[in-house]
Image (cartoon, rainbow, N blue to C red):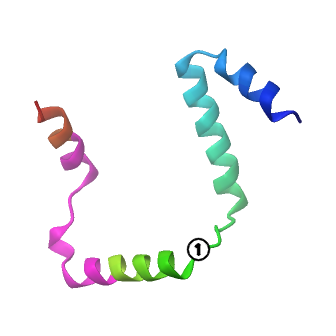
Amino acid sequence: MNMTTTLAEISSLSVDDRIKLVQAIWDTIAADQTHPNLTEAQKKDLDRRVAQLDDSPDQVLAWEEIKRGLRDDP
């Protein structure tokens, strides 16, 4: 596969079609259930975030709240 040619073809698609393509690609990645190799720094950061969530579960915003906040932002 020639990546340059493929990217040129993808660029010619509409934005909606490119989004659908990205979603389809992501679905194939998720279906493989492979996990990326994380650096030690990334692992520590994830551990820190999980610990923070465990310590303060009430400090979490639902996705709907985040979206609403973005829409309400001037």
The quadrant holding residue 19 is: top right
Q: Is residue 41 left or right of residue 64?
A: right
Q: Position of residue 13 (x, y in %)?
A: 64, 16
Q: Is residue 4 above or below residue 25?
A: above
Residue under label 1 = 38
Q: Position of residue 5 (x, y in %)?
A: 81, 25
Magenta highlight on residue 21: no
Q: Position of residue 38 (x, y in %)?
A: 59, 74
Image point (12%, 35%), residue name: 73
Q: Residues within 10 Å of mark 1 (few under 14, many from 20)?
A: few
Q: Is residue 4 left or right of residue 29?
A: right
**Magenta-colored segment: predominant secondary structure:** helix
Q: Position of residue 57 (x, y in %)?
A: 21, 75
Q: Identify which amino acid the numbered label 1 is placed on.
A: Leu
Judged from the image, the secondary structure of the residue bearing numbered disc 1 is loop
Q: Is residue 19 above or below residue 49?
A: above
Image point (79%, 29%), residue name: 4
Q: Nearer the viewer, residue 17 or 64?
A: 17
The quadrant holding residue 49 is: bottom left
Q: Is residue 39 above or below residue 12?
A: below
Instruction: Give the residues drawn in magenta, as a range.
Output: 51-67
Image point (24%, 41%), residue name: 67
Q: How many marks?
A: 1
The quadrant holding residue 33 is: bottom right
Image point (87%, 33%), residue name: 2
Q: Quadrant of the C terminus?
A: top left
Q: Quadrant of the N terminus?
A: top right
Q: Is residue 24 above or below residue 8?
A: below
